[in-house]
Image (cartoon, helix red, strand yellow):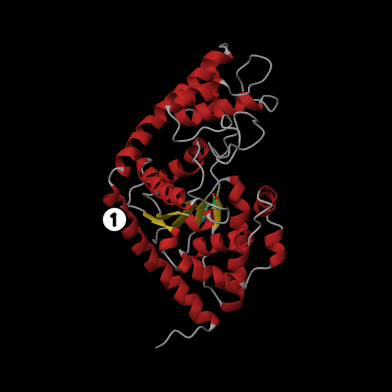
Amino acid sequence: MERKAMYSAVQPSGNLTIGNYTGAIRNWVRMQNDFDCFYAIANMHAITVRQDPAELRRRTLELAALYIACGLDPEKCTLYVQSHVPAHAELAWVLNTFTYVGEMERMTQFKDKSQKHADNINMGLMDYPVLMAADILLYQADLVPVGVDQKQHVEITRDIANRFNNLYGETFRVPEPYILKEGAKIMSLQDPLKKMSKSDENPNASVALADDRDTVIRKFKRAVTDSDNEICVSDEKPGITNLLNIYAAFRGCTVAEAEKEFAGKGYGEFKLAVGETVADVLAPVQQKQKQLLAEKDYLAGVLKAGAERAFKAARKTLSKVYRKIGFYQGE
Ligand code: TRP
């Protein structure tokens, strides 16, 4: 039986948080044995908000090193930089003609980002979901593991794919979003009703994968909790619930087990345990990432090989699309 294909990507903008790790990259690692996996560094998406060029370049390599440090094996999956494969931009252009302005204006993330970057509501920001559709459809992905915030983008990808297939016959596989329950949603440490975000202005709200041990522990110590002193999951206790979720995700236990472990203990002791557990998991990843970043040639080689593999797969789909829509391709 043919293996299912999986596609996902992360933007090399901002510092990745522990939410990116538990909600995305760590799960990708589990899937690399069972699926044909394509994991990209979405630098073309990143420029939809202004980036510092030197920083973008540095973060691109850092993310590549992080992917590998987290356990993605470049022999098993295709790791590459989005801009290395021109088919993304090419297919996005075609898909633009099958996407309506109205539906892009209604996308939640577009509305949020337009508010946040009111001085730079550029066409790319609005076109972001179409480029994402191009990413996914180029590789005929069956599954797209993403956080809940990206679900709407996978849904619009399905709409665009169906629209095209209905007009031109089966061309694209219609992907399913693959939302991972456990660890999928880690909330802000300062406002546990909000998702933890790498772009949060309050540095204490999020824990970066790059944070050192002391910083991690300090941020958890300062985490907002709830007024009583019971350590249990409850809708009325979003702060403690979030910390229990984080603990369970990093400890590799269930939330119920975590509740039991801390029953009757104080908030101070609990927060310290969460901080230490997270720091213990991050330390070896950070060390491996640092080591990889010192091996620039190795990283460049991995990304080059990844781009070549991605290019081949992408080109196949693109040329099918070009044929269907009537682009002359020589003979
Ligand atoms: N928009 C995604 C995010 O910010 C990143 C991304 C780009 C992506 N292209 C993708 C995710 C394709 C899944 C599939 O998280």
Front position in the image: 225 or 122: 122
Q: Give the quadrant of the N terminus.
A: bottom left
Amino acid at circle 1: Gly
Neighbor class of circle 1 (other Cα within 10 Å; few <14, some 14-19, many 20+) is few
**At which x and y percent is residue 150?**
59, 50
Q: Is residue 14 left or right of residue 33?
A: right
State the residue at coordinates (46%, 30%). 250
Q: Is residue 15 above or below residue 122?
A: above
The residue lying toward the viewer, choosing from 170 and 121, is 121
**Relative depth, front residue between 53 and 247:** 53
Residue 99 image offset from top left, x and y in percent: 64, 68
Residue 254 visible in the snapshot:
no
Within 8 Å of ligand 1, the CB of disc 1? no
227 lies above or below 84: above
Residue 65, relative to residue 2: is it above or below?
above
Q: Quadrant of residue 65?
A: top left
x, y percent for residue 282: 41, 31
Say which residue label 1 marks. Answer: 301
Any part of residue 44 in sight: yes
Judged left or right of residue 181, residue 309 is left
Residue shown at 71%/57% (left/top)?
A: 106
Judged from the image, the secondary structure of the residue bearing numbered disc 1 is helix
Front residue of 189 and 50: 50
Image location of residue 41, percent across then percent down: 45, 53
Residue drawn at x 45%, y 36% is 209
